[in-house]
Amino acid sequence: MTEQRTTAHGPTIVVGVGPEEFESALAFAAGEAVRAGCGLHLVHAVDLTPIPADHVLIPAADVEAWGAARLAEAVKVADDLVGGAVPVTHELVRGTPVGALVEVGRTARMVVLEHRHLSRLSRIVNRTVAGGVAAHLRVPVVAVPSGWRPDGEPRVVIAGVDVPERADEVLRAALAEAHARGARLRLVHSWSIPAPYESSFTAQEVRGWSDSARAEVCAALDRVGDLTAATDADVRVEQGRASEVLVEASADAELLVIGRHDPLVPIGSHIGPVARAVLREARCPVLLATPRPHRAAYHP
């Protein structure tokens, strides 16, 4: 195994290098590392889980050799992206991708992974690596869709606000990211009425709920930001399913910041159904904000 994790620049940005595309994740992570002046650390996991006897066996040495070659390819791309501005290190580890990245990422500044847009059937069968990693880490985790590339023009950082009174971590992260990028800040909150009851409410009542939700979102931003941030932010309250509203909003965003649940058991993904859907389908990089330092109650 190769290991070159130590850097004089403090915590690194960790990038998971998978068996398929990694260019978009590297492009995002390299930009973040250069902006922060910190190291970029590439990790590839070699999973040597025993294979059933009726399957074709691949020697462990061949698996590790292929992983090392894949990692070397990614390191070359990363070196070109950072242009010597920050150190690029790498590590080949044994284990599952989720387990390896959770272990390496505990002391990272941020963990970045790439994800592909899957078919509906594949989404049902598979969980994203990003979701599994985010469920067990307390550092920011970013999922970058394959094919994404920075366009060099700061646009907008979006904060997905679920419950305003519990949105402090998301709002702080979004404020910091918008400031670092010189981007506009947009807050997006959604609400919906169960279909059987939609006709039971007047248009005036619906507008009243939207106005009330907008006031709550603005109050939450006032609580964690300053007057300038609250005045300049674009607050949007929309009726609809949260995941669909956020995925649609991601189309013209530089970054989408959302929250996640704390895990209550040591296995499985507990980031929440909205976060899982957004991770799979968003059209821009998605940052899962760091959860609170204490264990919060689980809200389904």
Image: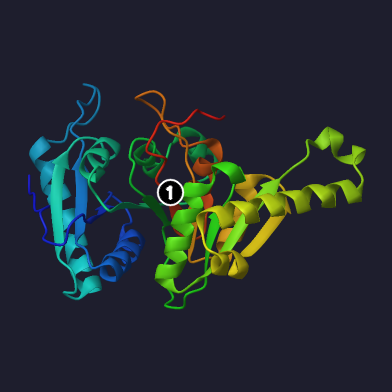
Residue topped by disc 1: 289
Residue at image coords 38%, 41%: 134
**x then y, percent, for residue 193:** 78, 39
Q: Position of residue 164 (x, y in %)?
A: 60, 46
Q: Amino acid at mark 1?
A: Ala
Viewer-proximal residue among 175 and 144: 175
Visible in this render: residue 162? Answer: no
Q: Position of residue 197 (x, y in %)?
A: 85, 35
Q: Quadrant of the N terminus?
A: top left
Task: Depth check: give the residue in front, 295 or 56.
Answer: 295
- Residue 112 visible (yes or no): yes
Tell whether 4 sits left or right of 282: left
- For the view shown, which residue lies furthest in the bottom direction? 153
Residue 300 vs 134, above or below: the answer is above
Secondary structure of the residue carrying tag 1 is loop
Total numbered labels placed on residues in the image: 1
Residue at the image point whose x is 23% and y is 72% from the top: 82
- Quadrant of residue 76 within the rendered picture: bottom left
Q: Is residue 106 left or right of residue 151?
A: left
Q: How far across and how far down the image is residue 64, in percent?
A: 12, 43
Q: Quadrant of the C terminus?
A: top right
Residue drawn at (24%, 22%) of the image:
52
Residue situated in front as seen by the camera: 281 or 34: 34
Residue nearer the viewer, 156 or 281: 156
251 lies left or right of 170? right
233, above or below 111, in the image: below
Instruction: Tell whether 19 sits left or right of 212.
Output: left
Q: Is residue 184 above or below residue 114?
A: below
Q: Residues within 10 Å of mark 1 (few under 14, many from 20)?
A: many
Q: How is the image coloured?
A: rainbow
